[in-house]
Amino acid sequence: GEEGYRTYQYALEDEEWDIIIFQRGAEELKVNVPWSDMQTSCLQQMIEYTRNNCDYEPTILFADGLANPVGYGDYQTRESQNEQTRHIIETAQVMRSKFGIDVIPVGVALQNARNTVLHNYGYNNGLENHDLASDTQQLDAGLGYYVTGATLFEYIIKPLFGLSIINH
C-alpha cells in the first residue's frame, strides 16, 4: 500500500497481538441500528479471517459503544438513555450467542456514569447536557476517556495481573 497505510493482514503479521478488539462505528450506535444480516456476516468474516490468518491465538473481544447523549435528536429523556442501555446489552448478547466472543462493557460503564452527577461534566458542543460526549458520537477527552480507560483496565489488566484501580 501507500506509505503510511497498512492492511489488516499486515497488522496481524506485524505483531503477535494478545487481544484484538472489534467495535461498531459511531454512526450505527448513534441511531441504535439493530444488527443487520450484512453487519453480522461482515463481523463473522472478520472474526474468521482473524482466527485463520494468525499463527498465534489472540483473544478476540468486542467493545460496546457510546450511546447518544440526552438532548440529542430523539434522545431527550433519561428513559431514552435506558432504551439505549438495553440496546447495548442486546449487542453484548449478540456477540456471545452468534460469535462466541465476550464484550468489554465500556458502553454500560458510560451509561452508568451518565446516570450520576458525572453527566454534567465535559465539553458539550452546545448540547443541554454534557453527558461525557464531545459531539454526540465521540467521547469527551476528560471523564469520558477516564471512564473508558478505567473499564478497559479493570476488564483486561486486573484479571491478568491482579491490579485494580478501584480504591487506589
Image (cartoon, grey):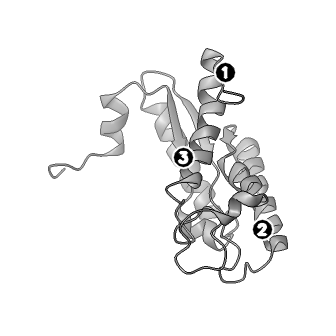
Q: Nearer the viewer, residue 27 or 116?
A: 116
Residue depicted at x 80% and y 73%: 80
Is any atom of residue 36 visible in this view?
no
Q: Secondary structure at mark 1?
A: helix
Residue depicted at x 61% and y 18%: 160
Mark linked to residue 12: none
Q: Nearer the viewer, residue 27 or 38?
A: 27
Amino acid type, mark 2: Gln
The residue to which callout 3 is attached is: 22
In the rendered view, does 9 fall on the left or right side of 20? left
Amino acid type, mark 3: Phe
Q: Are marks 3 and 1 in contact (CB under 8 Å)?
A: no
Q: Residue furthest top?
A: 161
Q: Residues within 10 Å of mark 2 (few under 14, many from 20)?
A: many
In this rendering, the answer to whether 147 lies above or below 90 is above
The residue to which callout 1 is attached is: 159
Mark linked to residue 81: 2
C-alpha span from label 3 to label 1 = 20 Å
Amino acid type, mark 1: Pro
Whichever of labels 3 and 1 marks the residue nearer the N terminus, that label is 3
Instruction: Give the number of the mark in front: 3 or 1.
Output: 1
Residue 4, image x and y in percent? 19, 49
C-alpha span from label 2 to label 3 = 23 Å
Q: Secondary structure at mark 2?
A: helix
Residue 95, image x and y in percent? 70, 46
Q: Nearer the viewer, residue 96 or 72?
A: 72
Residue depicted at x 37% and y 34%: 12
